[in-house]
Image: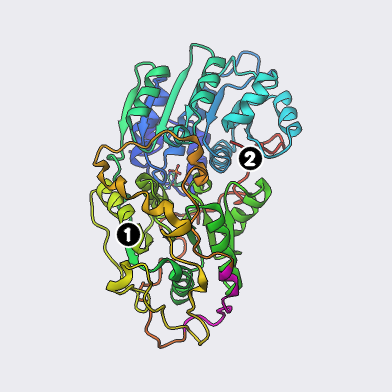
Amino acid sequence: MSFAELGLHQALLTAVAREGYTTPTPIQLRAIPVVLEGHDLLAAAQTGTGKTAGFTLPMLHRLMANPTPAPAKRYPRVLVLTPTRELAAQVAESIATYGKDLPLKSMVIFGGVGHQPQIDGLRRGVDIIIATPGRLLELATDRYADLSRIETFILDEADRMLDMGFIHDIKKVLRMLPAKRQNLLFSATFSDEIRTLAKTFLHQPREIDIAPRNSTIDTVTQKVTYVEQRHKKELLSHLMRQGDWQQVLVFARMKHGANRICDYLNEVGLPAAALHGNKSQSARTKALADFKAKKIRALVATDIAARGIDIDQLPHVINFELPNVPEDYVHRIGRTGRAGNDGEALSFCAPDERAFLRDIQRLIKREIPVLAVEGFTPSAAADRPEAPRPPRPPQGGRGRGGGQGRDGRGGGGGRSSAAPAAGRGESWNRPASPQRAEGAARPAEHRSGGPAARAEPAHTGGFAPGTGRGNLPAHNKPAGAGRPGGGGRPGGGGRPGQHRSGSRGGGGR
Ligand code: AMP
């Protein structure tokens, strides 16, 4: 079935064609008719499935089909609530893209930037608000944002919302909405918590589950490689050079860890930026824009910050550290292999992360193939506290391990504390823990790559050719494959600000 057959407004069909979409994705095929008919919807769809267009296209269609009686006076008619600033910006960008030819105004509202532009934008009037909860509640409480005429309320990535402790904010927002409205809830998974939340505000929802629970996306090639924690940075730079990776998203568990990886890559001549909650909104926006524009080769992100990153044809995701929450693994690898493109997700598993790997494999119900990278595979002795000999330094002078200590011991105690999690079984449910965001409530930060890492001699030349190290094939997908139009979203910077009314939102949870 085509987009035209779904009965969408001509301007939307033009926009979709401009983006190069030829056929609706499964979530779009199923969600669009439901939303067009005005039903409430409970949808399980992972990121990368095209779910944003799945709710945006019919939402825009309905706004056009039911114009307000007094168009001169605009009230917000649609509210999209997202867990992170990045996702809000991303959704706003999609709305701006698909609604380019429509006389509708949208704006993002989030914290981390000045209030005034947002207040001004609201005063001028908008049809669609895309917001994170904190700033929206502030502006609504101060009566700048009037939510009393919202016709459609969309809760995106609701599972992550709950993870981040937004349940009370969501409830507060719901109390500000009119009783009669359409509600759409999107979540990567249908956990018991999500179903409980859904019951509180969805009315006879249609249910769509296009993502079999916790399955991982088939277009992503998943591999795991065993490596000592203290050799991970070298392994990363080695793989990046050997495969000539130009765009790799690297996941770290902790903000400081992300900084250290980033510093290391920059030191060894691989331009990188970090993306996490301690960064200012402008730094986050710049990091994302530079990454999209391929000005930097690596973006090192924490789980929360990475939500909402949508980069077409992102070929490589590295789990520098395995997440201690198995479902985060699914989210992470969903950053690649998007929209039918191939992607490669490689996890670096240190000896003390095996329990996390077991949890992940149990959750996704498959074993992740092991990739041995010559020179980096720990010997059988790796499970002993004393590390084996480090890999041979590339041009001499390295391999001291930097005095970093091993993860899982000392400062890395948090790692081993996760071991009992292995017994959680299939029905594991993520505890609602607001502080878990960005790893804040996680146990002690592991120390790998600590200050001593700075003392490592800079590794500028890569691994000498002929050392035979590494065997990860280079990603060689032709540019532009899978997405006619080349993925060119206007702006590309991931931060559209206000569509048509000039105001820009900021960040804020
Ligand atoms: P989402 O799951 O909403 O984050 O979308 C993931 C990616 O799929 C985005 O880059 C979209 O631009 C792209 N996309 C959405 N719908 C389609 C479609 N029907 N055909 C091709 N790509 C699409």
Q: Amino acid at mark 2?
A: Gly
Judging depth in this view, the residue of 485 and 239 nearest the camera is: 239
In the structure shown, which secondary structural element does the residue marked by tag 1 occupy? Answer: strand
In the structure shown, which secondary structural element does the residue marked by tag 2 occupy? Answer: loop
Q: In the visual, does 433 lie left or right of 354?
A: right
Image quarter in which the C terminus is found: top right
Residue bearing mark 2: 507
Residue drawn where x is 49% and y is 31% of the image:
9
Judging depth in this view, the residue of 334 and 303 nearest the camera is: 303
Q: Is residue 155 magenta?
A: no
Q: Residue furthest top?
A: 179
Q: In the image, which residues are magenta?
A: 452-463
User: Is the CB–ligand 1 distance for label 1 below 8 Å?
Assistant: no
The x, y position of residue 25, in whole percent, is: 36, 42
Asked if residue 446 is positioned above or below residue 136 in the image, the reply reads below
Residue 222: numbered disc: 1
Image quarter in which the N terminus is found: top left
The x, y position of residue 203, in whole percent, is: 38, 16
The x, y position of residue 188, in whole percent, is: 38, 38
If you read the primary sequence from the N terminus, does the residue marked by circle 1 or circle 2 appear first? Answer: 1
Viewer can see residue 104: no
Judging depth in this view, the residue of 379 and 175 nearest the camera is: 379
The x, y position of residue 314, in whole percent, is: 46, 58
The crowd level at tag 1 (other Cα within 10 Å; few <14, some 14-19, many 20+) is many
Asked if residue 276 is positioned above or below residue 57 in the image, the reply reads below
